[in-house]
Image: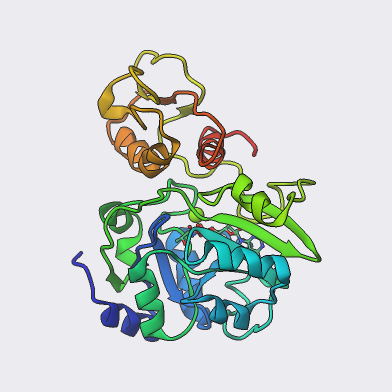
Amino acid sequence: MTSASDAQAADALRAGRLVILPTETVYGLAADASNAAAVASIFEAKGRPRFNPLIAHVADAMQAEALAVFDDRARRLAEAFWPGPLTLVAPVRDTRAVCDLARAGLESIAVRVPGHARARAVISAFGGAVVAPSANRSGRPSPTTFADAVEETGSSAAAAIDGGPCAVGVESTVVSVLNGRVALLRPGAVTRQEIEALIGPLDTAGEGHRSPGRLTLHYAPDAPVRIEARERQHGEILLGFGPGVGDPRWSLSPSGDVREAAAKLFRLLREADRERPAGIAVSHIPNDGLGEAINDRLRRAAGFVG
Ligand code: TXA
Ligand code: MG
């Protein structure tokens, strides 16, 4: 598939077609958020259960506040981290701009202003909100390169934009700001520590169980994934972390940098899977900063409940 222009992508969205859209986190499969038929074809293309709502992507915070009701803390989070890898879940304001199916009929809505300039350019050229789940088929690792996105869902898209490899490599941090309570629904590149430094302690009661999309087996390659591995077992590929651990070709970060590991995580899981190993083992990764998001995805890939 060749890369489309921003105008071609916007035209495809207007025609109710799907577009592969680069973001700084992972590649998305985008549609006009107000068009229920277009949104239905996203669920179809991904094999995604319809109870799992989508994120509305917008060009700026003003457009976000036209869709959602922000309180003071939501506004501070938006000011600090947008454009960037943060999704805010807040009460829905405009129920037409983002159709019922996209919101899975909820009273809340997820919104984000992506950090990738091409994503914002397409959204601006289109003029409305764009829903975009990760461009993988449901349950599989998210694509972080143009080639991986096209391989996953390219056959369902009318246009695709090559925005290069995704700088962050794991999906956005999802934070809900509802009824005066702020909770972390999905860890990501905007870390718990950064959020708490800005708005104070997060509400941790029931954390991780409030997002309908947090299915148990998720982000998973075909090969079984074994985490916290000390060494490679027979037939396995070991994704190492830190100096001298395993084959450098398969290292998430030879220097032990969690940002580098996040950027490589899904690409290496996919590449390892193509070798048809008996299993994919992954070294221990510290839980600080982006490590929390990496470990969250790996636990789910390995089949553990969050
Ligand atoms: O980085 C990202 O967020 C990527 C790129 C493409 O923007 N998108 C992405 O979308 O990861 P998706 O659909 O794969 O994940 C959206 C997550 C799901 O876990 C979903 O359940 C949750 O956001 N979500 C959406 N609306 C919600 C709502 N109203 N309440 C709670 N969780 C919600
Ligand atoms: Mg996803």
Residue at figure coordinates x 33%, y 28% from the top left: 251
Q: How far from the left and from the top, in percent, is residue 216?
A: 61, 42
**Looking at the image, residue 1 lies above or below residue 302:** below
The C terminus is located in which quarter? Answer: top right
Q: Quadrant of the N terminus?
A: bottom left
Q: Residue at x 35, y 40 (%)?
A: 264
- Residue 53, visible in the rendered structure: no
- The percent coordinates of residue 57 (x first, y second) are 49, 71
Quadrant hosting residue 249: top left
In the displayed structure, 50 sits above or below 95; it is above
Residue 43 place in picture, x, y as percent: 50, 65
- Residue 206, placed above or below residue 299: below
Residue displayed at 65% across by 84% down: 94
Give percent across and percent down for residue 122.
35, 77
300 and 293: which one is in front? 293
Q: Can residue 96 be seen in the rendering of this structure? A: yes
Residue at point 33%, 70% (across, down): 118
212 vs 81, left or right, is: right
